[in-house]
Image (cartoon, rainbow, N blue to C red):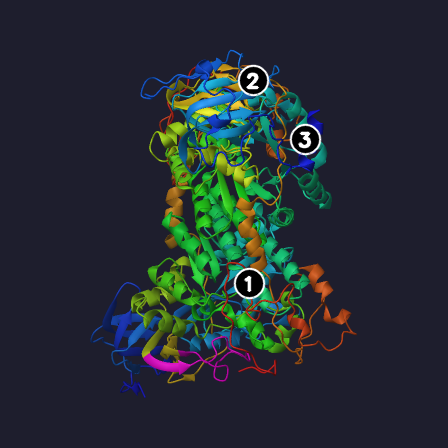
């Protein structure tokens, strides 16, 4: 065993598990790796260095030069998600246990309020479930499933009082929780003002419902209809649209579940253009593909059903791993949400009724190590970045989470780069009967997992305690996303051109047709009194700038045209 | 009369044109072998004074056009008073989109009858000596909006002034947009536009019809327009929220109908939802001038909509045509989509090729307002050059003008609110010269590509080719003798439009028409226009243009979807509450297991049906452009896992 009890000194109280020393480890952060010992106490990292002076009664782990990495953060889970009266198989206990078994020491779950219901109530419900059951620390994203002033106030409250800084909206699921472009614009504007992160489920829901009815009409009812009705182009289109709206509203964007090459391409293009956008591929899209939808085994095919679907293009996982390694995609989640075969069979005659979700919380870190690190695409530091650090930065939890540093939480993993294991439903921690990575042989696995300063996994043995997981509040305006946003906000002050009053003839027109009825009503020319020349060129905010230099939104540089004339109606 | 002719044309669109049957009847294929000795057949053989034209051999001398009429003595037959119907252009360099060559052209009855050297022509023929000048197919302006109604006003140029301006610039055919007010029948709007154009247009015209709302009745009217009225293109709007804008689902349905009818789907690409939000925000900030127009419609919003339209078009396997490409990013999206194989065409306009959006910040309100059009001109001053480059390399294919100017008093409706400014700019007269100046003079494209983007491609896309868009025997006698060296300063003082301002004011362009021939008649010579109001004919267009639909048809055949034949699922099924969560209520109701109690055990062979014809690779499911590796076969017991 790696564990040795150091000689006891009688003066020290016996709190074995709260004091932990890792000796001879190679500490891997996202920026560098170095050899040092780590001393932890009360769930926090207290010292890092060589030849540490530690109190007695300390449990010591000999790492023997193995890598010590920050525990993984699974930024997207959906444990015990309600679906039409049933609940997804893995609850917070089962789910977080799987997470810990895979080297993930924190999860961020999605609160999904039924459209029309209160966000606060749903948040409280989720928090209660998690507090009772979670074995590791957790945070919550809240999904915005409908939009009105009440929701707005609730979002405000959640940001200010409840430690939520990320909200997901849906561009798919027509007539259920899909948002229109205008709603997206308003939500993004609002989140940008409050310092939140806008997450999106990116798929064009309107086209999907058309395609779904077409598939069913031509008699395709099996799971292959799921992927046929949701081609990757629809995902890419929605990502493009979301990027446009986010850039328009100057709001940081986070694309959940990047499943296809084209969607990933759009994200990397947008990043090249300077948009603040993060892409989250999931364990499923990084590890397997959508050819299984055509399996003759209905249950197997149904087990892969998730949205956006896995791409039938078998080169997708490799491509996504490459973009993850290059930094074009930033974080990884699992979107873990499993259902039993009987639950999936709700849709046995109609693929649109199959409950959606795949497993992945346990396999995520090993998959990425195997697909991206052992293949030489990324190094160990990048591995830490995409499995943990970047997520912590986006959620504003850094450096408490996502880094091995003095003062950080003692969530660590000793990673065995040589371990090889075969994924199978027989041995996985999830309650699901099938594992979408079934039979896959993965290199790289956690040897020891330390969560809240306690050893929860050693030599394949899990020692988890349900209910010890704490809610970690996320504060708004994460620097990682908002530094650029704030700078751009200052640049983006719009300014009207000061002109004299138009004094020429005005044509008669009927009011029946106008661009935006509300706006036209407000500024209808008849209602306007004679306008002061000086009023028309005012600026709303920001430092004064030379009068004749209009300032335009960030990223758009415009040559100022030559000055006009004093008589504004004369032409030529 | 005109409408009778139109109806006749649409009923017999394929009927060959009547051949001239005199002694000088051209031999079939005479244009193919240009060495054919017509002299042998000529009655005028040997007549010394018979040659009307002295060929000018040295074309480096200043070019000038000579138009002469023969004395009439040698006119032996068929010479009534229709002199202008017989026209001979001698010594021209004929420029088509594929090649240029020197030959003479003889036209009669508005149709090109002979092409070749030493043509034998009847007497009484008006002759134009081109002295080696370039003779090209007349331009086709694919996008005009003459006398467009807008809130009780009508755009400044009607079909007379508009088509006159077109002819003055070398454009001999226009395609106008019919904009039915929502609630008005497509057909009655179409007839209204025909009536206006028939009574006023000076050149041939055709009509696109805009789909401004969507329901079943519209689909039926579209079918009638395609089958009986010679329309093969329909425009949908992704912008103008609460007025013309269609939702994605509606666009999907429209595109599906359009593909079934064999028409071309045109799209006005801007995200109307975002535009509406931005407009509100910008008005709230107190920006009411024309600069608010461009600020509320950033080019990203255009690119996004183009991308979405491409997606829906791919999904429905429908050919797409993006009108008014105004920005670099929108053009890029089109270029990318074409690289991926999408059937998509992009139409930059005169305005986007010739000027930019910096003028929206002009302190002169009326000047700034004159530039208001949607999508707006990009404030990026490198845009025109970029678009000309893409036009030259073929990533963009056709050019229109979207000519729809309003005079200043009309624009002033929006003097306190930029969202009320009527939209549209001029450009039908300047289109060809601007492209010549910006693209050919700068070496981006050659004369043949110039013909392609100003005329031929438009004719191909809209199924007018080779009647229009090509100089060939049997084609319409719509020709332009182009002077590449003439320079001209564009100004509202001299243009043919009725508006007070020209958005290209002061721009010096090189290249312009010397002589314009429309329907076999000279309408422009030496700067003098001789147009006839109402002489323009409606040109009916047939569906399924080859240029567009060859690929679409092939893909339709490839795109059959197939279910996987599986046994019946016989395991346990979870109980569900019936009430909530309906993705597609119709479909779920249709296949709800509870409602089919008497359905027999499913035959394994039935469930894997195909919709039409068996293929060699029947077992491979696929969509078009999406090849899928078939997974290894499943097990017999479909519920077992592992």
Among all residues in the image, which is located at the extreme right?
A: B598
Element at label 1 = strand
Closer to us: A516 or B628: B628
Residue at mark 1: A111
> In this rendering, is residue A149 above or below A46?
above
> In this rendering, is residue A225 above or below B421?
below
Q: Chain of mark 3?
A: B
Disc 2/disc 1 C-alpha distance (Å): 80 Å
Q: Which residues are magenta?
A: A418-441
Element at label 2 = helix
Q: Chain of mark 2?
A: B
Q: Is residue A201 visible?
A: no
Q: Chain of mark 1?
A: A
* Screen quadrant of the N terminus of chain A: bottom left
Disc 2/disc 3 C-alpha distance (Å): 23 Å
Asked if residue A431 is among those painted magenta in the image, a careful observer would answer yes
Q: Is residue B223 visible?
A: yes
Element at label 3 = helix
Q: Seen in the image, is B24 located left or right of residue B333?
A: right
Q: Which mark is residue B6?
A: 3
Residue B255 is situated, as x and y percent measured from the top left of the image, at 61, 48
Residue B111 is situated, as x and y percent measured from the top left of the image, at 56, 28
> In this rendering, is residue A251 above or below B615?
above
Disc 1/disc 3 C-alpha distance (Å): 63 Å
């Amino acid at each position: 065993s790696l564990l040795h009890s150091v000689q006891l000194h009688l003066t020290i109280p016996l709190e074995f598990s709260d004091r932990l020393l890792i000796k001879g480890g190679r500490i891997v952060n996202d920026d560098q790796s170095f050899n040092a010992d780590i001393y932890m106490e009360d769930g926090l990292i207290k010292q890092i260095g060589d030849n540490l002076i530690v109190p007695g009664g300390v449990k010591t782990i000999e790492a023997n030069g193995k890598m010590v990495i920050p525990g993984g953060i699974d930024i997207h889970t959906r444990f015990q998600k309600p679906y039409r009266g049933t609940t997804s198989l893995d609850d917070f206990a089962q789910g977080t246990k799987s997470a810990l078994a895979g080297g993930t020491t924190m999860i961020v779950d999605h609160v999904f309020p039924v459209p029309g219901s209160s966000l606060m109530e749903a948040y409280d419900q989720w928090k209660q479930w998690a507090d009772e059951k979670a074995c590791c620390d957790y945070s919550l994203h809240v999904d915005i499933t409908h939009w009105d002033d009440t929701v707005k106030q609730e979002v405000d409250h959640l940001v200010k009082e409840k430690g939520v800084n990320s909200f997901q909206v849906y561009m798919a699921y027509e007539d259920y929780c899909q948002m229109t472009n205008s709603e997206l614009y308003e939500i993004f504007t609002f989140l940008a003002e409050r310092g939140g992160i806008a997450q999106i489920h990116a798929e064009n829901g309107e086209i999907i419902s058309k395609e779904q009815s077409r598939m069913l009409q031509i008699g395709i009812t099996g799971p292959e209809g799921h992927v046929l009705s949701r081609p990757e182009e629809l995902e890419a289109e929605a990502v493009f649209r979301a990027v446009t709206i986010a850039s328009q509203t100057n709001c940081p964007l986070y694309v959940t579940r990047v499943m296809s090459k084209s969607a990933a391409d759009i994200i990397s293009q947008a990043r090249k253009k300077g948009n603040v956008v993060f892409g989250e591929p999931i364990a499923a899209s990084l590890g397997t593909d959508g050819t299984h939808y055509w399996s003759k085994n209905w249950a197997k095919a149904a087990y892969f059903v998730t949205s956006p679907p896995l791409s039938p293009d078998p080169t997708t996982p490799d491509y996504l791993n490459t973009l993850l390694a290059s930094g074009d995609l930033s974080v990884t989640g699992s979107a873990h949400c499993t259902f039993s075969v009987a639950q999936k069979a709700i849709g046995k005659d109609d693929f649109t009724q199959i409950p959606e979700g795949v497993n992945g919380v346990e396999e995520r870190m090993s998959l990425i190590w195997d697909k991206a690190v052992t293949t030489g695409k990324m190094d160990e530091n990048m591995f830490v970045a995409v499995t943990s650090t970047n997520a912590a930065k986006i959620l504003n939890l850094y450096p408490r989470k996502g880094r091995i540093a003095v003062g950080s939480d003692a969530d660590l993993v000793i990673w065995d780069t040589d371990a090889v294991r075969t994924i199978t439903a027989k041995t996985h921690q999830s309650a699901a009967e099938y594992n979408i990575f079934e039979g896959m042989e993965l290199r790289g696995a956690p040897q020891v997992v330390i969560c809240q300063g306690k050893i929860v996994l050693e030599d394949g043995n899990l020692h988890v305690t349900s209910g010890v997981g704490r809610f970690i509040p996320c504060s708004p305006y994460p620097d990682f996303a908002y530094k650029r946003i704030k700078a751009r906000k200052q640049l983006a002050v719009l300014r009207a051109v000061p002109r004299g009053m138009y004094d020429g003839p005005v044509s008669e027109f009927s009011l029946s047709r106008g661009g935006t009825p509300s706006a036209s009503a407000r500024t209808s020319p008849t209602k306007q009194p004679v306008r002061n020349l000086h009023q028309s060129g005012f600026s709303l905010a920001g430092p004064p700038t030379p009068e004749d230099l209009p300032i335009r939104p960030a990223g758009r540089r415009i040559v100022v045209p030559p000055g006009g004339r004093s008589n504004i109606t004369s032409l030529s | 009369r005109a409408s009778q002719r139109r109806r006749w044309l649409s009923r017999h669109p394929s009927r060959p044109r009547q051949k001239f049957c005199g002694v000088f009847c051209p031999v079939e294929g005479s244009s193919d072998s240009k060495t054919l000795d017509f002299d042998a057949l000529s009655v005028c053989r040997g007549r010394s004074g018979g040659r009307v034209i002295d060929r000018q051999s040295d074309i480096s001398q200043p070019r000038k056009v000579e138009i002469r009429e023969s004395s009439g003595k040698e006119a032996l037959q068929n010479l009534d008073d229709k002199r202008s119907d017989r026209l001979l252009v001698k010594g021209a360099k004929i420029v088509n989109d594929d090649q240029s060559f020197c030959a003479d052209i003889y036209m009669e009855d508005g149709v090109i009858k002979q092409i070749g050297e030493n043509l034998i022509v009847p007497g009484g023929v008006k002759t134009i000596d081109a002295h080696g000048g370039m003779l090209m197919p007349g331009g086709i302006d694919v996008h005009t909006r003459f006398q467009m109604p807008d809130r009780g006003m009508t755009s400044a140029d009607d079909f007379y002034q508009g088509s006159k301006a077109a002819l003055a610039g070398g454009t001999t055919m226009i395609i106008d947009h019919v904009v039915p007010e929502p609630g008005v029948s497509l057909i009655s709007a179409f007839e209204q536009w025909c009536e206006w154009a028939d009574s006023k247009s000076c050149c041939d015209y055709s009509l696109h019809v805009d789909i401004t709302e969507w329901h079943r009745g519209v689909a039926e009217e579209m079918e009638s327009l395609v089958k009986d009225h010679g329309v093969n293109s329909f425009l949908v709007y992704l912008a103008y929220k609460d007025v013309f804008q269609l939702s994605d689902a509606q666009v999907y349905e429209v595109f599906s109908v359009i593909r079934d009818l064999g028409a071309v789907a045109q799209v006005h690409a801007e995200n109307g939802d975002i535009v509406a939000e931005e407009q509100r925000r910008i008005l709230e900030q107190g920006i009411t001038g024309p600069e608010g127009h461009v600020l509320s419609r950033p080019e990203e919003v255009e690119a996004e909509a183009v991308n979405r339209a491409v997606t829906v078009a791919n999904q429905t396997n429908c050919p797409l045509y993006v009108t008014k490409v105004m920005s670099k990013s929108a053009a890029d999206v089109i270029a990318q989509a074409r690289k991926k194989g999408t059937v998509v065409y992009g139409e930059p306009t005169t305005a986007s090729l010739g000027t930019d959006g910096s003028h929206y910040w002009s302190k002169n309100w009326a000047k700034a307002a004159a530039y208001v059009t949607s999508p707006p001109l990009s404030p990026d001053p490198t845009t025109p050059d970029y678009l000309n480059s893409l036009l030259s390399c073929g990533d963009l294919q056709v050019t229109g003008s979207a000519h729809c100017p309003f005079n200043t008093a009309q624009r002033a409706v929006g003097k306190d609110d930029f969202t009320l400014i009527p939209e549209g700019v001029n450009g039908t007269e300047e289109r060809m010269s601007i492209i010549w100046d910006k693209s050919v003079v700068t070496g981006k494209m050659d004369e043949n590509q110039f013909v392609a983007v100003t005329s031929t491609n438009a004719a191909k896309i809209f199924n007018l080719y080779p009647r229009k868009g090509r100089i060939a025997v049997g084609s319409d006698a719509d020709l332009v003798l182009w002077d590449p060296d003439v320079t001209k300063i564009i100004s509202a003082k001299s243009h043919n439009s009725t508006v007070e301002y020209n958005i290209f004011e002061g721009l010096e362009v090189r290249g312009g028409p010397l002589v314009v021939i429309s329907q076999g008649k000279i309408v422009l010579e030496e700067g003098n226009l001789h147009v006839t109001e109402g002489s323009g004919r409606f040109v009916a267009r047939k569906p399924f243009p080859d240029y567009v639909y060859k690929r679409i048809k092939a893909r339709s055949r490839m795109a059959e979807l197939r279910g996987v034949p599986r046994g019946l699922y016989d395991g346990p099924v979870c109980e569900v509450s019936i009430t909530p969560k309906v993705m597609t209520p119709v479909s779920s109701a249709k296949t709800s297991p509870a409602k089919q109690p008497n359905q027999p055990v499913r035959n394994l062979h039935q469930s894997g049906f195909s919709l039409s014809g068996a293929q060699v690779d029947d077992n491979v499911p696929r969509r078009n452009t999406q090849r899928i590796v078939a997974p290894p076969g499943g097990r017999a017991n479909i519920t077992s896992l592992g």
